[in-house]
Amino acid sequence: MDDSFERHCEQIRASLAARRERLAQEIARHPRPITACDVHFNRLLEERARIAEALGRFDEFVAFVSTV
């Protein structure tokens, strides 16, 4: 892989990981939710799941590209 491409991949992954960490911190500080009633908390959980999924797909993409 090209060095520039690798740097971009590292930046993208670091950005996703940093967002995941910020979400984890926000979720940890969030007051205990009322089941099925706390829209903000539920959205945080949904975003955390999307970020985790995006990180997984991105890692798969980078692994695939490095084999080509």
Image: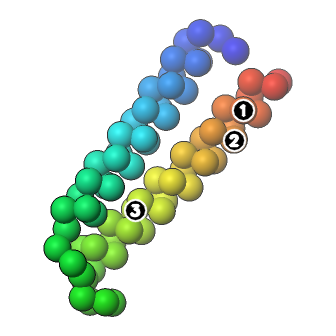
Q: Amino acid at mark 2?
A: Glu
Q: Secondary structure at mark 3?
A: helix
Residue 34 vs residue 13, the one in the foreground: 34
Q: Kindly indicate whether the residue at mark 1 contacts the one at mark 3 (C-beta within 8 angstroms).
A: no
Badge 1 crowding class, 10 Å Cα cut-off, few under 14, some 14 to 19, many 20 or more, is few
Does 5 sit left or right of 48 as displayed?
A: right
Residue 53 vs residue 32, the one in the foreground: 32
How far apart, in angstroms, are the residues tagged by discs 3 and 2?
A: 20 Å
Q: Kindly indicate whether the residue at mark 2 contacts the one at mark 3 (C-beta within 8 angstroms).
A: no
User: Residue 63 bears which disc, if any?
Assistant: 1
Q: Amino acid at mark 3?
A: Glu
**Quadrant (top left, top right, bottom left, bottom right) of the N terminus:** top right
Q: Kindly indicate whether the residue at mark 1 contacts the one at mark 2 (C-beta within 8 angstroms).
A: yes
Q: Earlier in the sequence, mark 3 or mark 2?
A: 3
Q: Residue at x 60, y 41 (%)?
A: 58
Answer above or below: position of 23 versus 37.
above
Measuring from the top left, give residue 10's x and y in whole percent. Answer: 50, 25
Reading the image, the residue beneath label 3 is 47
Q: Secondary structure at mark 2?
A: helix
Badge 3 crowding class, 10 Å Cα cut-off, few under 14, some 14 to 19, many 20 or more, is some
Measuring from the top left, give residue 30's x and y in whole percent. Answer: 19, 68
Q: Residue at x 43, y 42 (%)?
A: 16
Reading the image, the residue beneath label 2 is 60
**Quadrant (top left, top right, bottom left, bottom right) of the C terminus:** top right
How far apart, in angstroms, are the residues tagged by discs 2 and 1?
A: 5 Å
Q: Quadrant of residue 35?
A: bottom left
Q: Amino acid at mark 1?
A: Ala
Answer above or below: position of 29 versus 16.
below
Does 66 sit left or right of 38 as displayed?
A: right
Q: Earlier in the sequence, mark 3 or mark 1?
A: 3
